[in-house]
Image (cartoon, rainbow, N blue to C red):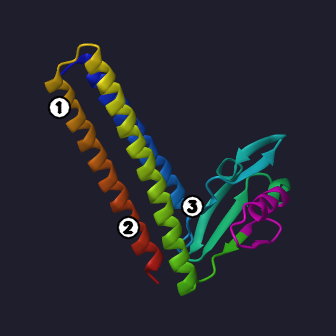
């Protein structure tokens, strides 16, 4: 296979993989009625004037299936952590006992579960759009290479490889969405 075509395929695969990783991170943040330290990814605390990820200024542990305990490495950070959780719009009120912060995850209603499934599907659709755009960009690059002397057979093979990458990544999106939907709908 032509070296330039190989580079196009590698770049396309990399773009599609990044889209999957991004979607995976977004899906982790969607809570499914069970406590998970992943729910706190993305929350930053002001630490010596710098926004710092929560897991770098406190230990995060699960007490039970519906309770997260956050223990700051420095006691003076409790107020800042509490404020950061409020500002994150998680919909959970932190309980501060002076040393730890507890987050009680409330049970979800059927309507809330359906809303979260819908939100998950929207994340999946955004990921599919990024994957399809990567396919489009790769096919345009292949057409440019063909105009610059790439044989028609090599171009067709490259386009087929790009389509196979697209199909594989879309299937992974569907699988991730199915797993998340089952997680959300399981009571």
Measure the C-alpha gap from mark 3 to mark 1: 39 Å
Query: Comparing marks 2 and 1, which lies closer to the viewer?
Result: 1
The crowding category of the residue bearing disc 2, from other C-alpha atoms within 10 Å (few below 14, some 14 to 19, many at least 20), is: few
- The residue lying furthest to the top in this view is 149
What segment carries the magenta color? 79-101
Measure the C-alpha gap from mark 3 to mark 2: 14 Å
Q: Quadrant of residue 151?
A: top left
73 to the left or right of 153:
right
- The residue lying furthest to the front in this view is 147
> Where residue 60 sits in the image (x, y, percent)?
63, 60
Residue to which mark 3 is pinned: 29
Q: Nearer the viewer, residue 71 or 30?
A: 30
Q: Nearer the viewer, residue 139 or 147?
A: 147
Q: Determine which of the numbered discs, if any, sits on residue 179 in the image.
A: 2
Residue drawn at (76%, 50%), measured in percent from left and top?
Answer: 45
> Where residue 164 sits in the image (x, y, percent)?
23, 43
Q: Determine which of the numbered discs, if any, sits on residue 157 in the image.
A: 1
Q: Nearer the viewer, residue 44 or 147?
A: 147
117 to the left or right of 48:
left
The answer to whether one can see residue 33 in this image is no
* Quadrant where the N terminus is found in the figure: top left
The crowding category of the residue bearing disc 3, from other C-alpha atoms within 10 Å (few below 14, some 14 to 19, many at least 20), is: some
Are circles 3 and 1 on residues that touch, CB within 8 Å?
A: no
Q: How many marks?
A: 3
């Amino acid at each position: 296979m032509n070296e330039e075509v190989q580079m196009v395929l590698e770049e396309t695969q990399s773009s599609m993989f990044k889209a999957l990783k991004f979607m995976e991170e977004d899906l982790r943040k969607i809570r499914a009625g069970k406590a998970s330290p992943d729910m706190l990814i993305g929350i930053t605390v002001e630490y010596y004037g710098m926004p710092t990820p929560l897991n770098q200024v406190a230990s995060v542990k699960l007490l039970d299936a519906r309770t997260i305990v956050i223990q700051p490495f420095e006691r003076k950070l409790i107020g800042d952590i509490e404020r950061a959780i409020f500002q994150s719009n998680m919909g959970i009120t932190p309980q501060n006992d002076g040393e730890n912060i507890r987050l009680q995850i409330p049970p979800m209603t059927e309507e809330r579960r359906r809303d979260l499934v819908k939100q998950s599907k929207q994340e999946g659709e955004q990921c599919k759009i990024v994957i399809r755009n990567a396919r489009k960009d790769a096919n345009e690059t292949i057409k440019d290479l063909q105009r610059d002397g790439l044989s028609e057979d090599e171009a067709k093979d490259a386009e087929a490889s790009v389509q196979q990458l697209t199909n594989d990544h879309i299937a992974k999106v569907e699988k991730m969405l199915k797993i998340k939907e089952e997680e959300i709908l399981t009571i």
